[in-house]
Every structure is written in structure tokens, then in C-alpha cells.
Image (tube, grey):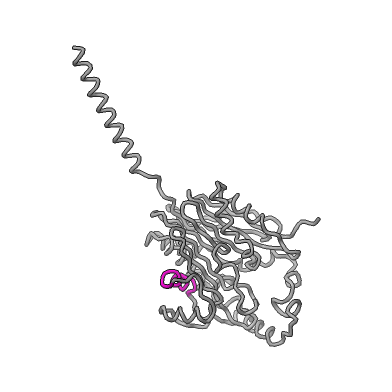
Amino acid sequence: MVRCVMSLLAHLMTIAVLCGSCQVFQMHQQPASQPVLVINTWPFVNATRAAFAALSRTGSALDAVEAGCLQAEADQSLESVSYGHHPDEAGNVTFDAMLMNGVTMEVGAVAAMPDILEAVSVARAVMERTGHTMLVGDRAADFAVEMGFKRRSLNTDSGGQATASQTSAATCSPPADHSCGPYRPASSRDSNPGNRRLGHDTIGMVAMDAGGGLAVGTTTNGAAHRVPGRVGDTAVVGAGGYAKAGVGAAVGTGDGDILMRYLLAFAAVSEMSLGASPEAACRAALASVRPPPSGFHGALAAVDADGNVGGACIGFDSFQISVMRPGMPEPSLLPVPCSPGRPARL
């Protein structure tokens, strides 16, 4: 009798252990779901929709940020992004753009590129079809044509901007430190950096896909009336945007000539790697900026590996992050408080 009871108990224990093992195995086979979302700087909701539609269609974070940036490049209502706006002093519109794959850490970028509308797609071609990271100027446009893109003029006389630039260039007699157009100190052009938000600013996008993909895309037509050949933060990896799978991604917008000095997108991702929330990471990164006497305007938007979204802002009157996730019929706008952009008085 005792032997039978002992045998039965041993049999039950074996079943329990086996069932327990089955349960543990099933738990390991069911990893936590990967966050899926698209975010971008500013309330550019049409770009958000385009990016999320691509994400839903192909399941690729890279496809998503490319599609969103393409929509912005073609939307003439976005004056700081699309063609026909923000010409340089010679009256020419050029594009800066960048894509980064946060899984492979591959980057493609173009800068000061004329005559090609689909700048972000050319940046992707640089990443996927060459061993390089950035192409610039007319040679970037030549490469785009070799890749099948069509040359077209990016100039329009929208609001007389191109004519104004050409007139400025024709009558300009530097010394370069205080004379024409962009050579003048920023304070003489606009004493309030917050007022420079007209048309908002660069679009930066982040996408996460169900397969663990993480990507960043940025594009802009650059600062208005800039010196021809000027490149801002948008095309510079770590400044305009940065992504690292397992950690998160960040994108920046604002005064690119200052933003690129601090590699703020990289700084924000580095903060998240140390455990900071997206908002805290963006605040810490922006806190490293030493504003010039004329003031500074800039903002960051970030996503961590869990899909949490946050941002920080200095100098703009307002800043919003457009967010779209599965199940949302429309993008949601996340307001981000902005602090003053002037240095503290001593």
C-alpha cells in the first residue's frame, strides 16, 4: 500500500513538473509585443498619416519615415519643408535630408541638393546603393538622376521670396560679418526667436515596426536666405536625428546652425540608454545648449524602446508632436511646453 502511494505521488510530481515545464516554455515563446507607431515634429498630420499608411502596408519603419517625409516635401503649405520656399541668397531652393536605420546603424543623407524633389528617397538610395553616408550639392543631384530621379526646378516665386533673394544678392556688398541677408547678426533680423516659427520648421520622423525595426527620417529646404552651400542639422546624423534599436530615437527641429554643434538627437538617445524617459532625455539634451545673446529656438521629440513619447522645447511659442498608433483613426497631437530661448542675465 505504501509502495503504491509513493508511486502515485511520484507520478503526480512528474506530471506537475512536465506541465510546469510546458507552461514555462510557452511563456518564453510569447515575447512582449513590439510597439508600433509613427511620430513627427510639428502638427504635420498629413505626413503622419502617409507614414502610418506605409507602415501598415509594408510593415517597415524605413518605408514609413520615407513616405512621411516624401509627403512633406511635396506639400507646398509646409513652407519650411517643401519645394518653392526658403531659397538661398541666390534665389535657389535646395534640400537637406537624412534617413537612419536604427537596427543596422546605416545612414544615408543628401545636403544642399538642387533640382530633385524626392530628397529623402535619394538619401535612402545613398544608404542602400553606395558605401557612403552623405552626398552634397550638384553631385548629389547627378547621383539622383543616375538612380532614376527626375530633375525639376524647385524654385517658385511664392510670395516673392525668390525675387527678394536675387535682389538681395545683387545689391550685397559684404563685409560678411554685418552686411547683407544672412550675414547680418540674427538679432538684427528678428529680436524674438519665437517669431521665427512661421511655417514651423524641419520635419523629423520616427517609426517603430512590429518586427523590431526603428528608423528616423528628416527633410527640409533649409534656412531662408542662407548663404548658398549652407548645410543645417537636418542632414547630419546625431543632430537632425538618431536611432538605436533597443534604446530609442530622437529628432530635432529649430536653429540648425546651433543644434548641430551639440548633436542633440544623439545626446537624447544617449540619455535614454541610461534610463531617462523620452521627455527627461530631451530636456537634458537641450540643457546642454549655451544660447547666443540673440536667443535660440529648438525642440526635440523622442521615443524609447517601449514606445513612450516625449519632447522638450526652447524658444518657440509652441511645439507639438504628431503621434499615430494602431487603432487610432487620426493622429494625436502631443503639446510640449516651451521655455524661453534667451540666455539668463548674470
Considering the image in quadrants, where does the C terminus appear?
bottom right
Query: Is 101 inside the magenta-drawn segment?
Result: no
Q: Is residue 210 left or right of residue 316?
A: left
The residue positioned farthest toward the right in the image shown? 346
Q: Position of residue 64 (x, y in %)?
A: 44, 63
Classify 333 as above or below 153: above
Q: Is residue 154 left or right of residue 32?
A: right
The residue positioned farthest toward the bottom in the image shown? 170
Considering the image in quadrants, where does the N terminus appear?
top left
Magenta segment range?
Answer: 118-130
Q: Nearer the viewer, residue 66 or 126?
A: 126
Q: Nearer the viewer, residue 155 or 62?
A: 62
Classify 189 as above or below 344: below
Q: How many marks?
A: 0
Q: Position of residue 102 (x, y in %)?
A: 47, 59
Is residue 31 at all visible to an observer of this figure? yes
Residue at 62% x, 80% y: name it.
228
Q: Position of residue 328 (x, y in %)?
A: 45, 53
Residue at 41% x, 72% y: name it.
129
Specify the principal SS of the magenta part.
helix
Residue at 41% x, 79% y: name it.
148
Query: Is 123 inside the magenta-drawn segment?
Result: yes
Classify 47 as above or below 95: above
Q: Position of residue 121 (x, y in %)?
A: 45, 71
Is residue 335 at all visible to an observer of this figure? no
The residue positioned farthest toward the front in the image shown? 131
